[in-house]
Image: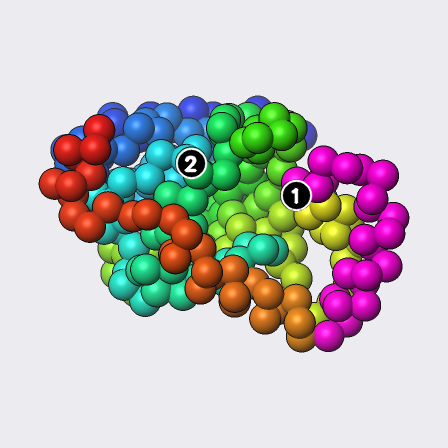
């Protein structure tokens, strides 16, 4: 018999000072039954939830290793320059980001979070809800984030064709839903090759050019 998620207050332990130092805003999360987080893992979870809400800061990103990887169906970002731009880019491309649900279902390595997020795309004003499973991989000491996989519908494309993810991608990027059928055949041809993986790598390289990231914590404070 399943039970409803329990609430875990991130500030009710020895990590409170660290949370304040890092400026973590996500102070409370839902956990599945029997899931326990150490203070350091609570800090890391709070950081990730803030980032997915479109609230990045250089202070929070100190929890990431310099050579960490961010991986989702649209992007493969490797290294600090690339993954920082991805997080700061959320504020550029979306006018609203609302985290509808986030439940931690595993506290191991990786930490696994089931997440549902609503995005409002700038200019066209279209809402899109994305359900995903986020996996957070940490260093041996659990002190740094070394990889984050944002798996839409629990998956990340490799060279395997996935109809459900294709339509979800189109719904996010194209407001002309009637064009989906035509685009479907075009992208299905690409999906069978390695071109899609190259696109994700290219996205990770190009976004840092388009998105401005503060040079330092002091510069970021002045902007606020």
What x and y, as percent, mark residue 173? Answer: 66, 43
Question: In the image, which disc is placed on residue 173?
Answer: 1
Number of disc labels: 2
Could one spot residue 74 in this view of the protein? yes
Residue numbers of the magenta segment: 171-193
Residue at image point 37% right, 26% down: 28
* Residue 182 sits above or below residue 221 on the image: below
Judging by the rendered image, the residue that carries numbered circle 2 is 91
- Alpha-carbon neighbours of circle 1 within 10 Å: few (<14), some, or many (≥20)? few
Asked whether 181 falls inside the magenta stretch, the response is yes
Q: Quadrant of residue 23?
A: top left
What x and y, as percent, mark residue 70? Answer: 45, 57
Q: Quadrant of the N terminus?
A: top right
Q: Nearer the viewer, residue 144 or 209?
A: 209
Which numbered disc, 2 or 1, marks the residue that appears first in the sequence?
A: 2
Residue at image point 49% right, 52% down: 135
Asked whether 63 falls inside the magenta stretch, the response is no
Prevailing secondary structure class for the magenta stretch in the rendered image: helix
Q: Residue furthest left?
A: 218
Residue 183 horizontal side relative to residue 17, left or right: right
Residue 199 horizontal side relative to residue 178, left or right: left
Q: Quadrant of residue 101?
A: top right
Residue at image point 29% right, 48% down: 213
* Residue 115 sits above or below residue 96 on the image: below
What x and y, as percent, mark residue 129? Answer: 64, 32
């Amino acid at each position: 018999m399943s039970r409803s998620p329990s609430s875990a207050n991130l500030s009710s332990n020895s990590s409170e000072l660290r949370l304040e130092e890092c400026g973590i805003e996500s102070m409370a999360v839902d956990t599945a039954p029997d899931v326990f987080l150490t203070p350091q893992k609570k800090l890391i979870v709070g950081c990730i939830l803030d980032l997915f809400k479109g609230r990045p800061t250089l202070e929070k990103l100190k929890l990431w290793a310099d050579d960490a990887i961010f991986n989702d169906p649209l992007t493969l970002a490797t290294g600090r320059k690339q993954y920082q731009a991805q997080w700061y880019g959320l504020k550029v491309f979306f006018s609203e980001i609302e985290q509808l649900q986030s439940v931690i279902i595993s506290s191991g390595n990786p930490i696994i979070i089931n997440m549902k997020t609503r995005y409002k795309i700038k200019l066209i004003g279209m809402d899109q809800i994305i359900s995903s499973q986020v996996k957070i991989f940490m260093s041996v000491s659990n002190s740094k984030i070394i990889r984050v996989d944002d798996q839409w519908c629990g998956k990340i494309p490799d060279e395997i064709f996935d109809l459900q993810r294709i339509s979800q991608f189109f719904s996010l990027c194209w407001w002309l839903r009637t064009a989906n059928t035509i685009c479907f055949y075009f992208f299905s041809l690409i999906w069978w090759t390695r071109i899609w993986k190259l696109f994700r790598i290219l996205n990770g390289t190009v976004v840092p050019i388009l998105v401005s990231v503060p040079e330092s914590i002091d510069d970021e404070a002045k902007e606020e």
